[in-house]
Image: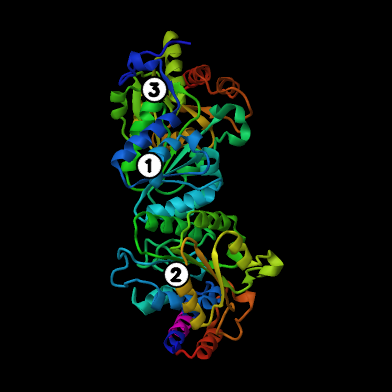
Amino acid sequence: MAEVKQAAKGPAEAVKQQKMATRQAYGKALVEIGAENKNLVVMDADLSKSTMTAEFAKAYPDRFFNMGIAEQNLYAAACGLALSGKVVCASTFAMFAAGRAFEIIRNSIGYTHANVKICATHAGITVGEDGASHQTFEDIALMRTIPGMVVVNPSDGASAEALLKQVIEMNGPAYVRLGRAAVPMFYDEAAASELKLGKGSCIRQGNDLTIIATGIMVNEAMMAAEELASEGIEARVIDMHTIKPLDEEIIVRAARETGAIVTCEEHSVIGGLGSAVAEVVVKKFPVRMAMVGQQDTFGESGKPDELKAKYKMTAADIVCAALVAVENPA
Amino acid sequence: MDFKQYEEISARLRVDIVKAVHKAGSGHPGGSLSAADIVTALYFKEMNIDPKNPDMDDRDKFILSKGHAGPVQYAALAERGYFPVEELWSLRKLGSRLQGHPNRDKVPGIEMSTGSLGQGFAVSVGMAMAARMDGKKSRTYVLLGDGELQEGLIWEAAMAASHYKLDNLCAIVDWNGLQIDGKNDDVMTVKPIDEKFKAFGFNVLVIDGHNFEEIFAAFDAARECKEKPTAIVAKTNKGRGVSFMEDNPGWHGKAPGEDEARQAVSELGGEW
């Protein structure tokens, strides 16, 4: 696979090789933010060593609550703390946050606009060996249907930290999707600091098509773009780290200027980023689209890279989708 | 001690409930009437609240976890001066602040939007935790239905309230024994309610939920209990005060017609 080249706002050569899971960046950022923001409360449901909230718990034990294996109560109690003036980051695995606690998040947190940040880790296929029961592909779809819910899916450690800070500064509910597996550090600190909640980030210029990716698929999208470049196709790449509110302007511009869009997500192709982008494209500027993501099927146990390959969420799959989109214009 | 004034207030609340649900054409009279004495005791004596300053710091909080009994909370807020009594007649109508289930954004004095059972209790646990963190005197009162105890979330929240020793939290169970489909005992047994809460680490008091002397004594005991949350299991009658509604599950979620409403108001000593 082609080496990732310097992007527009680009990853510095030095940091490019490092790897870090977005959940690790989350744990580290919480401790930093907690030093300044005494109003920050962190809660967990017996997974603090996996979600990385354990670091906050160690640093500020009086502002951390373990609620046990009870995700519904985790989010309802978080709501009570938030409505009493706290800003709360409440973490568990994405399956049990967005899935099991959905209706509590909808009715208690969403309906009251409570200042709860649902920081959900272990999302998607890269959970790996734990298998289908723990691999959620539905969370973005569920969360983005809740009125007022901000939905964020960072692509790497630096962007996770930068976006988390913005999510904590805003008032109201947000869903932050984080991963288990270590992924390449894509942004350096300076580039990450330019990211803005609600604004897609164009990380590679090109006019033949646009690849809109979110989360850990951004790195795959950049590798795909280099592969396509070797075949003479220049792809624009957008890191759509915020899925709601969605940056409609950058999508419409991409449709108008490049004529084809491929979306990439470690999430079901039903209801996620692909659907969100399509909702804009069909209304504002219809162009040919393709969607890379989990098809309508459950996952299974395996190594993250093996699973990404089997379930067609790699750079090679993006290249295939891009060629189809480019060769069959609308 | 004379409790006549509280009995008069709860009778007014019951008249308001019947009229409001009748005018709305839908709603939940049975479980509103069963809770009227408990809610009167909270809003008119027990709680430190100020209708002129609904967001007062250190105020006590009331969460109606059985949100379908919204009419009893609305009636209490109106009679306490949070908004005009006449506004009760807008219940459930388009554009009204008085939604079918309480909404905290719209009505001063409503601490939590409820309606989906179990959640109000769990949110009140978080509120009690926050009050503790901030060293506030504020106490949190939460009213649960007995059928609501069938929700798993109730027991997650109960476990947490006890684990975190939330002695500033007081749950009251409106134990009228009935739910939409019939008796709790036939639909899904919730007994023994007192033993369940005891097993979860609560200070438990079983009282007659229509006897003000017992209600106030229970609140006093709850305040004095340290290191444990309190659950007051209050035996009540669904539809209390209206002969044809009492202990009849058919009046869980049905509005009285005009003749029925007139009769109910008359039985409650109110004016039409």
**Looking at the picture, which amino acid does disc 1 mark?**
Tyr
Is any part of residue B205 visible from this angle?
yes
Picture residue at 59% right of the left edge, 20% below the top: A306
How many marks can you see? 3
Above or below for A127 versus B170: above
Q: Are both tags, 3 and 1, on one chain?
A: yes
A214 relative position to B117: left or right? left
Task: State whether discs 2 and 3 lie on one chain.
Answer: no
Q: Is residue B12 magenta?
A: yes
**Quick one: SS at disc 3?**
strand
Q: Amino acid at mark 2?
A: Glu
Does residue A248 appear in this view? no
| Chain identifier of the residue bearing label 1 in the image | A
- Which region is colored magenta? B9-16
Report x, y in % for residue A107. Answer: 48, 54
**Callout 3 amino acid:** Val
Q: Please tell me which residue is depicted at 54% across the width and 89% down the height of the picture.
A: B263
For mark 1, give the secondary structure.
loop
Q: How far apart in space, not on screen, are marks 1 and 2 (Cα)?
A: 31 Å
Report the disc number at residue A237.
3
Residue B224 tag number:
2
Q: What's the chain of the residue with tag 2? A: B
Q: Is residue B120 left or right of residue B55?
A: right
User: Which residue has dot 1 on it?
Assistant: A60
